[in-house]
Image: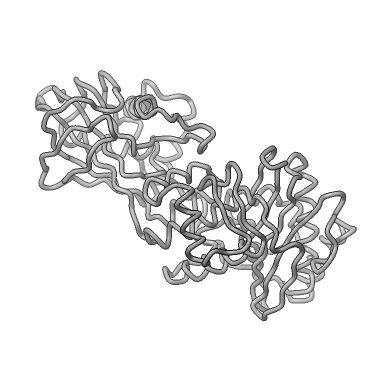
């Protein structure tokens, strides 16, 4: 598409949503109050209440993403160790003992990953666990929906996760949704399910018993960059599980206050997902985006490798498809944020516009308008199209999309098998 045609398309889209608001002035669109800040590569800027704190909702995930990359690195993989205690009967395939699972904070382990492990356990001669399946408190399977769905009691949570894992190993307990997921997995990547089956006598949660056990397998997750892309594309609140490896929200607050040398206004985080009450200013969000872009480049990544891109697979920008139809595929990379009730609700959008004259980083929010999501998104779309109408917005490569927890996951035997110690009620111990 030529420069003139692209500008005309964006201008017409903005006109359809008229009356448009100039990105350099005007605070209210159709009764929706907006705050914003944008910076272009050529040094030009535009602001409205850019230094006032607001609740950025799931835009907080940008801060978590940067912190994770800085701390762990883009290629970091989470290891989950599977050990056994007891003897295996070679003829019957029965383990006269227990299976113990030592998670190490993998936030993205699911039924398909459990099947990868099951195949290797079967290769090791185990088809039935006569004792119990135990997990530690750093193992998750499936989703919890962040702080809203988390079970705080470690024993209850471990029991739930142990049961989920046992069910994942037994096709007779699969729901129609699980059967569908496994069929799709098999069609996409040659998953060996649903013929993989391990029967577990009991799913017990945390192990309070002693006794020697030996590690037999380790499951390695996708690289961190792939996990972050998945979590951000769906704005998945279980990004909070990264607290196991990084620290809690108070630690993230300290990280940014020290990094930015006591910024004004003060940043604060209640969660790593954006649930609850968090505080950033529009200008600080733009700073986050610029620093994330810089850190990503050091890992040979683009922002589209970490955040949702318009028109590129399934992601939360699908909430805006008709409204932002004037922008080309990949021309917008942005993180959405929505809260309905907390702090009066908020609808936020922050990211990059790929302008041929220099990319534009922006943060746009409609504070205290969370109950009016559709109206807020229309107002934001008018603002964004009006901002883009003066420049030639360029299409860009999408980067990875529609990734899965098993895309780059692997399972390998632990060799040699090492003696270990039983998990304790305090959460278990890693293999020495």
Residue 373 in the image, given as x and y percentages of width and height: 74, 43
- Does 185 sit above or below residue 53? above
- Residue at 34 percent across and 57 percent down: it is 76
Residue 196 in the image, given as x and y percentages of width and height: 29, 31
- Residue at 49 percent across and 50 percent down: it is 230
Q: Is residue 5 or residue 371 the one in the foreground? A: 371
Is residue 403 toward the left or the right of residue 245 in the image? right
- Does 243 sit above or below residue 84? below
Residue 64 in the image, given as x and y percentages of width and height: 49, 54
Is residue 82 toward the left or the right of residue 296 in the image? left
Residue 69 in the image, given as x and y percentages of width and height: 43, 60
Tell me where residue 128 sits by quadrant.
top left
Quadrant location, the N terminus: bottom right
| Number of numbered discs overlaid on the protein picture | 0
- Residue at 15 percent across and 28 percent down: it is 210
- Does 199 sit above or below residue 288? above
Tell me where residue 394 sits by quadrant.
bottom right
- Residue at 38 percent across and 38 percent down: it is 112
Q: Is residue 349 or residue 153 the one in the foreground? A: 153
Is residue 262 toward the left or the right of residue 69 in the image? right
């Amino acid at each position: 598409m030529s420069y003139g045609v692209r500008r005309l398309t964006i201008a017409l889209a903005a006109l359809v949503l008229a009356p448009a608001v100039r990105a350099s002035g005007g605070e209210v669109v159709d009764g929706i109050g907006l705050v914003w800040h944008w910076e272009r590569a050529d040094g030009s800027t535009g602001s409205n209440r850019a230094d006032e704190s607001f609740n950025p909702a799931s835009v907080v995930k940008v801060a978590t993403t940067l912190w994770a990359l800085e701390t762990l690195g883009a290629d970091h993989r989470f290891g989950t160790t599977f050990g056994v205690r007891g003897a295996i009967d070679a003829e019957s395939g029965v383990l006269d003992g227990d299976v113990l699972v030592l998670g190490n904070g993998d936030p993205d382990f699911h039924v398909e990953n459990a099947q990868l492990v099951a195949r290797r356990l079967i290769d090791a001669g185990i088809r039935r666990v006569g004792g119990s399946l135990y997990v530690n408190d750093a193992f998750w399977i499936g989703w919890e929906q962040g702080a809203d769905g988390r079970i705080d009691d470690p024993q209850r949570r471990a029991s739930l996760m142990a049961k989920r894992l046992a069910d994942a190993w037994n096709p007779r307990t699969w729901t129609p949704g699980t059967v569908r997921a496994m069929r799709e997995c098999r069609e996409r990547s040659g998953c060996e399910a649903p013929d993989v089956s391990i029967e577990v006598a009991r799913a017990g949660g945390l192990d309070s018993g002693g006794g020697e056990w030996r590690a037999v397998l380790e499951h390695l997750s996708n690289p961190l960059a792939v996990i972050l892309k998945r979590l951000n594309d769906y704005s998945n609140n279980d990004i909070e599980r990264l607290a196991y490896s990084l620290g809690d929200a108070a630690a993230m607050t300290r990280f940014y206050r020290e990094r930015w040398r006591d910024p004004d206004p003060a940043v604060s985080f209640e969660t790593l997902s954006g649930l609850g009450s968090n505080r950033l200013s529009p200008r600080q969000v733009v700073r986050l985006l610029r620093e994330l872009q810089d850190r990503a480049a050091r890992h040979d990544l683009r922002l589209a490798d970490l955040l949702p891109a318009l028109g590129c697979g399934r992601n939360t920008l699908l909430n805006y498809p008709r409204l932002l139809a004037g922008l080309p595929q990949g021309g917008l990379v942005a993180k959405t944020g929505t809260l309905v009730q907390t702090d009066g609700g908020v609808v936020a959008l922050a990211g990059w516009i790929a302008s041929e004259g220099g990319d534009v980083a922006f943060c746009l929010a409609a504070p205290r308008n969370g109950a009016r999501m559709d109206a807020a998104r229309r107002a934001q779309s008018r603002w964004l199209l009006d901002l883009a109408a003066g420049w030639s917005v360029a299409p860009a490569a999408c980067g990875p999309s529609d990734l899965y927890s098993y895309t780059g996951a692997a399972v390998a035997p632990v060799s040699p098998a090492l003696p270990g110690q039983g998990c304790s009620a305090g959460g278990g111990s890693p293999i020495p």
